[in-house]
Amino acid sequence: MPSPLKGLFKNIFFVVLVFLLLATIFDLLNTPVQEIKEISITQLVQDINNNKVKEIKVVDSDLTATYYDGNVFESKKEADESASQALINFGANKERIGEVSFVFEEPSSTRDWLWPFVLMVVLPFLMFGIFFWFLFRQAKSGAAQTFDFTKAKAKLFGAEGHPKEKITFNDVAGLREEKAELEEIVDFLKNPEKYLKMGARIPKGVLLVGPAGCGKTLLARAVAGESKVPFFSVAGSSFVEMFVGVGSGRVRSLFSAAKRNQPCLIFIDELDSIGKTRGPAITGGHEEREQTLNQLLTEMDGFEQNDKIIVLAATNRPDVLDSALLRPGRFDRKVVIHLPDIQEREDILKIHSRGKVLSSDIKLREVAERTPGFSGADLANVFNEAALLAAKKNAKNIIQQDLLDSIEKVLLGPERKSHVMTDKEKNITAYHEAGHALVAAFTPNAEPVRKISIISRGMAAGYTLKVPKEDRFLRTKSEFEAELAVLLAGRVSERIKFRDTTTGASDDLAKASQLARSIVKTYGMSSLGPIVFGEKETNTLWGNEFGETRNYSNEVALEIDKEVKKLINKAEKEAERVIKQKKSVLDKLAKTLMKKETIEKEEFEKIVRVRRKK
């Protein structure tokens, strides 16, 4: 919808322009007319004889005389006589007549008076007519927008006249179980009679749940593409307005349009923007968002048995949704979409490699191994960044190193090559990152090191990239303890080498403290027993988390702090033990980093393996 303020400025500009144009025309045409006195031809002859007349303009029988003093007079002669003969007949001196300049002009035609009439009469009326026509048109458009305000802002795909790129399940890599779950929906939309004949009731609503970028919207479009039915796509936030009743009106408009195009799909993205748990009406009545939710609940529950309309919705916050939305009869089915595993990541990379010029050394499996926890959107971004890197270098194709560099750029941000560290800072950073890598290499259950670098990226002065050997969905306490030791190893390395610590370990300490607290309070992996301490508190009015409710006493809080401190101290001692035992390896790693700034997995393993043999 165009901005009302923008339209107002446009109208004001147009009005000012019209009035300026009219003022200019009237100023040009409304010049004052000089009044000319009429004299007799006898007086004119006397003035000619007295050498007062400079020029005589002759137009038919009219004589216009211009005097040397600037005065202008008019006179008349006989129509059948020439000007000079008429003057001579009245006694003008021939020599004086010869000194006067005569100008002869043709009598005025119709064009001479028609053009001023058009400029002074017709044009102003025409300009006023155009001006009022624009005003009436704007008023009509504003009235139409007023009545259109409560219409749903849904985009329609798949209908005639709306050609769009067709998406099918073949364009969605991975998600095998999720696609199988939705095949029933596709089959019902293709052959609804088969199910209705058996008395079966297809789910009226399917809720797609998963983290951001995992492919919820893409999967919904694939369902529409496979079923070949109209697909209404609308964002949940488009229903919410500051005016009461607008949201519910748009919900009614959306479902009315869907009933005219059934069988069809309605896809509501970010359902949590209108579907949050309803709270108390502190303003004396239901707020606008709750009215919108109430109307959505009514429309979904008001479907008849033979209605061929299915509602798909996506959210990454299912915990804040109102329970009335999730009951049978509304969103009957919940499809949880997980982040892709290694094989699915490789398949996703193959899809995103279409249309890109790749070199023969590309190994998508290696890229998939280096990107655990990446969503489909992250992987698309990796390939796009690789293409941008290749284009900047004016390369003919994308090479493997471009993909590997783009992974680090997506994870940590761009390289800060302009950030120049002092030799002291560079040395501290080298020992800090070498400490992380060394403890990761010699601690059981720690993730293997893929790369070490002291080149600044994003907010980090250096980084140690660790990648698990395989995708993991469960974590053990020993793995958590190993991760704590690796996190604290950078600070321990600084203290052992320089007998001092820096602020470079602040992020590591924050992560370690949070992990240790989660081990005790969330996972029940401490001497306090298998108990979860603390509950997330949600604002029932706005639906957002704003803190934690303590369901334990102050004495238990003291015990939790002791357990957290015990885990941190144990991890610090483990990191210190490894670094002191492998002090020579630490020095070699740090010196290599100072020289090369980056150590890849193969070189790192070579350094560690040589020292292990010794």
Image (spheres, grey):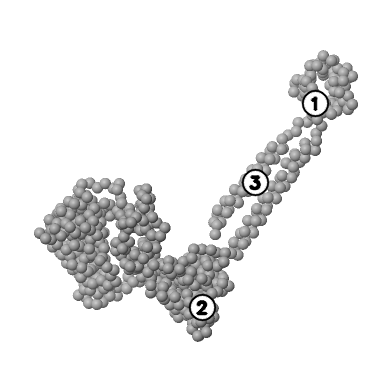
Relative to the observer, which residue lies in front, 49 or 229? 229
Residue at figure coordinates x 85%, y 23% from the top left: 83
Reading the image, the residue beneath label 3 is 18
N-terminal-most mark, 2 or 1: 1
Position of residue 373 measured from the top left corner of the image (x, y, whole percent) = 32, 65
Q: Which quadrant, please, contains the C terminus?
A: bottom left
- Viewer-nearest of discs 2 and 3: 2
Residue at figure coordinates x 41%, y 76% from the top left: 181
Mark 2 belongs to which amino acid?
Answer: Asn
N-terminal-most mark, 3 or 1: 3
Reading the image, the residue beneath label 1 is 104
For the residues bearing labels 2 and 3, Cβ distance under 8 angstroms: no
Figure check: 238 above or below 98: below
Q: CA distance from mark 2 to mark 1?
A: 95 Å
Position of residue 483 measured from the top left corner of the image (x, y, whole percent) = 22, 65
Give the number of the disc on residue 191.
2
N-terminal-most mark, 2 or 3: 3
